[in-house]
């Protein structure tokens, strides 16, 4: 069994929004992309992807259309709404603030141990 | 998609969800196949990665936020199925609730129409009633003061914050084709309809030009009068109507249902055209004033303004307006003291509803106990407790709704007869109808009764110890549920006791009141208002002669024994109260004792059969120019002179009469003027009679307008009405008898409210009795049913039927004892409320309880005897094999 850490609470939404921000994309593609970027680092359970997508859609952060894929199959493509884009920016900023602060604290702690 | 779309397009949502999942799985599987996996292996791994498609779907459904509605819908369908499975139970519960909700809805419909609905004008909260006000005026006794016509005109001209309109009541005779008819009309200022915000159904309102002396006589017809006289034809506009001998041109017709000062006028005429003397002076105060706040103005501003105008007028006209001011209040419908009766009935009906609900609650509880096992199974399969409670509540709320719907149906049929049956006329009866307020009330009541009384059973939904319940097999009766059942029965019995005792009190009161002596001989007496020919009203001498003529003509009618005229007669609305004093040093108005003053012709005492105690009645010799004389009753004699024996020959000062003093020539028996029920508690009981023949000229016309004739007959009084009408029609054929009654009717009507309340409380009490018996029967049948195996063992061990019956009855006897004890205490409190609200009722007596409680106890015992006997016939073999 691989040793992967769980995704911190609330970051799944952020990751999903970020992936979708690159352009309309269907659920399976999101799952693949998340797996690629996060391979060996964090565990993204595919099962919680769809409920998260539906929740974001109901909150109006995402919109969805049924379109054909390159292989000619019909799939549900998600895209960001204006509201979703705003949310992504806000969450990215707050994430950076948080990680910056955490990194600072960790560095301080090391300094203290020296 | 918004929430509603997600809810309503549930199927489409499901379809898309399914499609999305399938796409994901297939894409993943395809990729795995491309990577070299076998088809079956690829599918398995794709499913594994997703983590179970059904679970994912369920989580997606939760994300929609419409879950609770869907659950609710599921509960609803389940509840429907449960009710359909047990139609007998459902029918009993729905009918019981329907009776309770139906009765409460009828009462609330009436309360709503009479007391709660706003006045039927646009923006009624901007309408204001303006009254005259002086420090010495006793508003409690006489009601609010109206306003003098010149004062009204001044207020209307000066006020900036109010648009002011006025009207006065009047009555007269409409003649022309057909029989002359007595009508009630109102003289109104031309702006009245604008102030009220009412548009006429046809024609036009009065113009300012109509509203002054000498303008062409015009009239607006009331809708009912128009229907009666013109059968609703538009030809009425421009036609003419003869009112008191004067021709009026009809210019408008009010809309149906129009009310002015809580009555529907037959006709309206312009107030400004009336040149009567009492309208020129600031002394009399006949004008009822209604006003609308101008845009932006407040009631406080209006009050300040009116009191300022009042002060100015008081300075300017010291004789008439000193200390007089004006006050404004929001215009309210006048309904008199009917409110307390209505609230009383609503309270009584509330008790019936409570009993009905308790019944349903105990039915539900019995069912909940027998469904314990089913609920335990469902809990064991993973249903949360909250979910189970919610489902039980859905079921009882559904019962409540069904009951409520049937109840509202019953109420829709029931409230019209109720209004029609109301003693006398119910004020604002036309406003009594089912409206949104009533529907909201019934919906609230039925949901509340469903949910509240489903709560106890629902909370029994299993929490822990599932295996115990499952093992017990739904056969054990837990102590808590038995106690709850007993509590239900006890409260039902207690409520029934309250209603029974109330009905008993009313019954006894009615018996007592009916046997009272009214002070007059009510057999074979006819009384009727009468208006003289308008032609004679101009001259006091001719008026006196006309009344003399009426008396002589009536006397000649075959079957008439004696006849008299009188201004106010007993047991009917209307009276004249005046202050009196037994010596010449009369104190100021406020300190004088009050007496009813009645103007009569000499025969009056014979007609009414009022007994003479001392001295003499009036005679034909008591006339103008002679010494003013009076006859007083026992009560006045006692109050003024310390008894009848000292009174004759004494003198009585009555300053408001404007002449006197009066020499007391006779003392007569007290008459129950205020009706059989009301007289004992009346504020003014003393009675003073004076001869109409001695009335000064200036009063004769006004008094004539109030006169009635009273006739003692040898045959049934009502059979004389037609011959009297014919005989008294007068030379011009325009004298009318109206409001014809027999004294027997009036005496009976004076008890109508008590009789009506007795009837209703009788109905409520019987309902309560029946419901309580059904309740006690149901509970005992259920409890006994649960004990069948135990009883079987007892019988197998040799218990005799008698002792088994006793075993069951003992249980119910306990409940009956506690129920009646609690009920007695509550009934004592309720009796005090009744005593305050209903005239003539006696405080609760022991005998009332002694008469009513055994009835209830017997009925309850009988109801419990049936299950007891069934228990005694249990076959032990069958009982022990059960389950």
Image: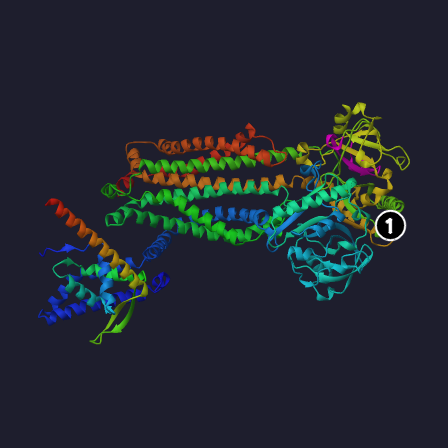
Q: Nearer the viewer, residue B637 or B802?
A: B637
Report the residue marked by disc 1.
Answer: B536
Residue B619 falls within the magenta-colored stretch = no
Q: Is mark 1 on a helix, strand or loop?
A: helix
Q: How many labels does the image show?
A: 1
- Residue B525 location in percent, x, y? 77, 41
In this image, A16 relative to B485: left or right? left
Q: Is residue A26 visible?
A: yes
Residue B602 falls within the magenta-colored stretch = yes
Q: Mark 1 lies on which chain?
A: B
In this image, B559 relative to B354: left or right? right
Q: Nearer the viewer, residue B443 or B506?
A: B443
- Residue B421 location in percent, x, y? 61, 47
- Look at the picture and state if B42 lies above or below B859: below
Specify the quadrant that holds the N terminus of chain B: bottom left
Q: Can residue B92 be seen in this view?
A: no
Tell me which corner region of the image, top left, top right, bottom left or bottom right, holds residue B611: top right
Specify the quadrant that holds the C terminus of chain B: top left
Which residues fall within the magenta stretch?
B588-612
- Residue B771 location in percent, x, y? 46, 42
In this image, B556 relative to B355: left or right? right
């Amino acid at each position: 069994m691989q040793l992967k850490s769980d995704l911190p609470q609330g970051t799944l939404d952020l990751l999903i929004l970020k992936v979708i921000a690159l352009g309309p994309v269907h659920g399976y593609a999101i799952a693949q992309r998340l797996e690629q970027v996060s391979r060996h680092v964090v565990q993204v359970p595919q099962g919680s992807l769809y409920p998260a997508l539906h929740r974001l859609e109901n909150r109006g952060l995402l919109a969805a259309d049924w379109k054909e894929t390159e292989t000619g199959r019909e799939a549900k493509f998600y895209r960001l709404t204006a509201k979703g884009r705003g949310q992504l920016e806000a969450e990215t900023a707050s994430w950076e603030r948080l990680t910056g602060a955490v990194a600072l604290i960790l560095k301080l702690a090391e300094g203290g141990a020296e | 998609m918004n929430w509603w779309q997600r809810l309503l397009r549930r199927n489409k949502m499901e379809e898309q969800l399914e499609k999305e999942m399938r796409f994901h799985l297939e894409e993943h599987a395809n990729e795995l196949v491309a990577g070299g996996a076998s088809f079956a292996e690829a599918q398995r791994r794709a499913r594994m990665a997703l983590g179970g498609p059904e679970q994912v779907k369920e989580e997606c459904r939760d994300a929609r936020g419409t879950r609770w509605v869907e659950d609710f819908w599921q509960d609803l369908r389940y509840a429907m199925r449960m009710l359909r499975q047990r139609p007998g139970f459902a029918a009993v519960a729905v009918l019981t609730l329907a009776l309770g909700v139906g009765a409460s809805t009828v009462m609330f419909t009436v309360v709503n129409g009479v007391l709660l609905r706003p006045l039927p004008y646009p923006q009624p909260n901007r309408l204001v009633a303006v009254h005259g006000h002086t420090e010495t005026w006793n508003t409690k006794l006489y009601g609010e003061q109206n306003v003098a016509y010149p004062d009204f005109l001044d207020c209307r001209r000066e006020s900036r914050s109010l648009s002011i309109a006025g009207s006065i009541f009047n009555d007269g005779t409409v003649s022309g084709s057909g029989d002359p008819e007595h009508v009630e009309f109102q003289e109104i200022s031309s702006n009245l309809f604008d102030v009220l915000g009412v548009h006429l159904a046809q024609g036009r309102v009065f113009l300012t030009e109509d509203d002054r002396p000498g303008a062409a006589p015009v009239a607006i017809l009331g809708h009912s009068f128009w229907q009666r006289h013109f059968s609703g034809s538009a030809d009425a506009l421009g036609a003419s109507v003869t009112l008191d001998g004067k021709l009026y041109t009809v210019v408008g017709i009010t809309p149906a249902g129009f009310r002015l000062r809580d009555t529907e006028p037959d006709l309206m005429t312009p107030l400004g055209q009336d040149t009567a003397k009492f309208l020129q002076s600031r002394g009399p105060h006949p004008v009822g004033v209604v006003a609308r706040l101008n845009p932006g103005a407040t009631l406080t501003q209006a009050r300040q303004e009116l009191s300022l105008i009042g002060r100015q007028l008081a300075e300017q006209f010291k004789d008439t307006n000193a200390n007089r001011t004006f006050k404004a209040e929001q215009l309210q419908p006048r309904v008199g003291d009917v409110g307390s009766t209505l609230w009383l009935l609503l309270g009584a009906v509330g008790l019936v509803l409570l009993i009905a609900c308790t019944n349903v609650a105990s039915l539900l509880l019995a069912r909940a106990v027998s469904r314990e096992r089913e609920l335990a199974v469902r809990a064991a399969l993973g249903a949360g407790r909250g979910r189970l409670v919610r489902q039980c509540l859905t079921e009882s709320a559904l019962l409540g709704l069904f009951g409520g719907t049937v109840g509202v149906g019953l109420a829709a049929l029931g409230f019209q007869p109720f209004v029609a049956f109301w003693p006398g006329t119910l004020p604002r009866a036309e406003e009594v109808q089912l409206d949104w307020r009533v529907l909201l009330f019934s919906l609230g009541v039925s949901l509340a009764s469903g949910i509240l009384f489903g709560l106890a059973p629902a909370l029994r939904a299993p929490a822990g110890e599932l295996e115990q319940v499952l093992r017990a097999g739904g056969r054990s009766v837990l102590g808590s549920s038995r106690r709850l059942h007993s509590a239900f029965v006890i409260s039902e019995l207690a409520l029934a006791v309250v209603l029974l005792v109330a009905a008993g009190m009313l019954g006894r009161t009615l018996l007592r009141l009916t046997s009272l002596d009214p002070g007059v001989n009510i057999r074979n007496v006819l009384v009727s208002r009468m208006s003289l020919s308008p032609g004679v009203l101009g001259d006091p001498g001719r008026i006196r002669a006309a009344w003399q003529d009426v008396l002589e003509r009536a006397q000649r009618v075959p079957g008439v024994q004696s006849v008299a005229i009188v201004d106010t007669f007993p047991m009917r609305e209307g009276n004249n109260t005046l202050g009196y004093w037994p010596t010449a040093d009369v104190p100021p108005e406020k300190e004088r004792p009050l007496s009813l003053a009645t103007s009569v012709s000499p025969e009056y005492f014979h007609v009414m059969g009022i007994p003479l105690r001392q001295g003499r009645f009036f005679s034909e010799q008591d006339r103008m120019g002679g010494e003013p004389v009076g006859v007083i009753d026992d009560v006045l004699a006692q109050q003024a002179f310390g008894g009848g024996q000292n009174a004759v020959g004494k003198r009585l000062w009555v300053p408001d009469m404007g002449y006197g003093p009066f020499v007391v020539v006779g003392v007569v028996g007290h008459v129950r003027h205020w009706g059989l029920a009301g007289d004992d508690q009346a504020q003014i009981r003393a009675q003073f009679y004076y001869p109409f023949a001695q009335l000064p000229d200036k009063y004769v016309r006004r008094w004539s307008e109030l006169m009635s004739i009273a006739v003692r007959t040898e045959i049934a009084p009502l059979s004389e009405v037609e011959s009297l009408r014919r005989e008294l029609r007068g030379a011009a054929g325009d004298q009318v008898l109206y409001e014809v009654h027999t004294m027997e009717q009036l005496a009976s009507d004076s008890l109508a409210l008590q009789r009506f309340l007795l009837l209703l409380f009788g109905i409520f009490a019987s309902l309560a009795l029946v419901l309580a018996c059904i309740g006690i029967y149901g509970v005992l049948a259920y409890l006994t049913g649960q004990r069948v195996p135990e009883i079987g063992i007892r019988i197998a061990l040799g218990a005799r039927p008698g002792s088994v019956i006793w075993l069951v009855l003992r249980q119910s006897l306990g409940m009956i004892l506690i129920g009646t004890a609690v009920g007695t205490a509550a009934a004592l409190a309720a009796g005090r409320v009744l005593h305050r609200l209903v005239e003539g009722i006696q405080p609760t007596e022991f005998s009332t309880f002694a008469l009513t409680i055994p009835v209830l106890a017997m009925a309850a015992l009988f109801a419990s005897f049936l299950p007891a006997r069934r228990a005694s016939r249990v076959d032990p073999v069958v009982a022990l094999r059960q389950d």
